[in-house]
Image: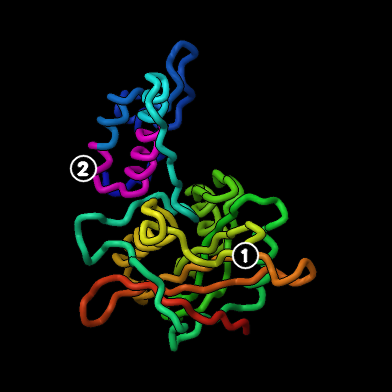
Amino acid sequence: MSSPFLSTAHWLDFLAGREVGSPPAATSRSRTGTLPELKRAIEAARRVGDPEGLWNLQTEYRKRADVCSADRGMPVLPVRMASSAPTQRASTTDPHNAAPNRVYRPPSPDDVRGTAGAVARIRAEARLEEGLERCGGLYSFPGDRLRIQAASASDNAVRTSHSVQFHLGDRVDFERNFGKDLVRVGDWHSHPGTERDSRPSGAYVNGQEGDMEAWAASRAVLENQPDFQGDYIGIIVTRGASWLAPPELHAYIVSRDKLTRVLHCESARLVED
């Protein structure tokens, strides 16, 4: 069994010997699992090499542990869901896979290019007026470097005003139905606040995992695919300069430094064509 990318509930089914995806018995606990069950599932996901399942399980474990701490009168630490939530975590032990610790400016000499249709869909799907972050994937034809041919949206994502957790099923559905000739090259998400903050979040800002860690982790998954060009595109959508102006798209490129092999992040111009 290699990289099944199972949800938390599916992993708990698998370890309990139930048919994966079967409805829980009426007398059973909710399949969020107990802390010991989640620990066993985390170890199993680590052994079989399921990065997305592992991140889902670790996130659920932290939530459950925080609830238990609150029940004992202990302070509850906030769980920061990785923006645009590619649900896997960047390596914290390998310095070559650690998330970038700054954004290099001025912009990269390389532009990110996007079709008019892809850019229009991102602006429409961002729905900044709702006040909640939204997200989706970015796709290109194999071999096209730094070009966005199509964009998807994750309608079932878990959203708050400052975080979003991508729903894997939305990505699978899009790639099955529309992306057969495309490869994933990045993701987009919105920052709907009125302050129009286009800066990627992350540990380099406030010590909490965020956009930088999510981008680094998603790039690590794509790096093993034959069509990967080396660059991961992240787009942050903010409000326009006025209430009449369209949403603004801010592009970032995460790639490896050719000399040090360490990941770095550059701001980039987004050119619509």
Q: Earlier in the sequence, mark 1 or mark 2?
A: 2
C-beta proximity under 8 Å, tags 1 and 2 = no
Q: Is residue 72 left or right of residue 115?
A: left
Q: Secondary structure at mark 2?
A: helix
Residue at coordinates 28% horizontally, 24% vertically from top-left? Answer: 36
- The residue beneath circle 2 is 47
Name the one closer to the observer, 16 or 187. Answer: 187
Q: Quadrant where the N terminus lies?
A: top left
Instruction: Report the magenta stretch's main SS.
Output: helix
Q: Secondary structure at mark 1?
A: loop
Specify the amino acid type for callout 2.
Arg
Specify the amino acid type for callout 1.
Arg
Name the one closer to the observer, 141 or 147. Answer: 147
Which residues are drawn in magenta? Answer: 43-63
The quadrant where residue 33 appears: top left
Q: Residue lying farthest right?
A: 244
Gap between marks 1 and 2 measured at Cα: 42 Å
Residue 44 place in picture, x, y as percent: 24, 37
Q: Residues within 10 Å of mark 1 (few under 14, many from 20)?
A: some
Give the number of marks.
2
Residue at coordinates 55% horizontally, 47% vertically from top-left? Answer: 157
- The residue beneath circle 1 is 196
Q: Is residue 202 above or below residue 55?
A: below
Residue 133 place in picture, x, y as percent: 59, 53
Magenta highlight on residue 111: no
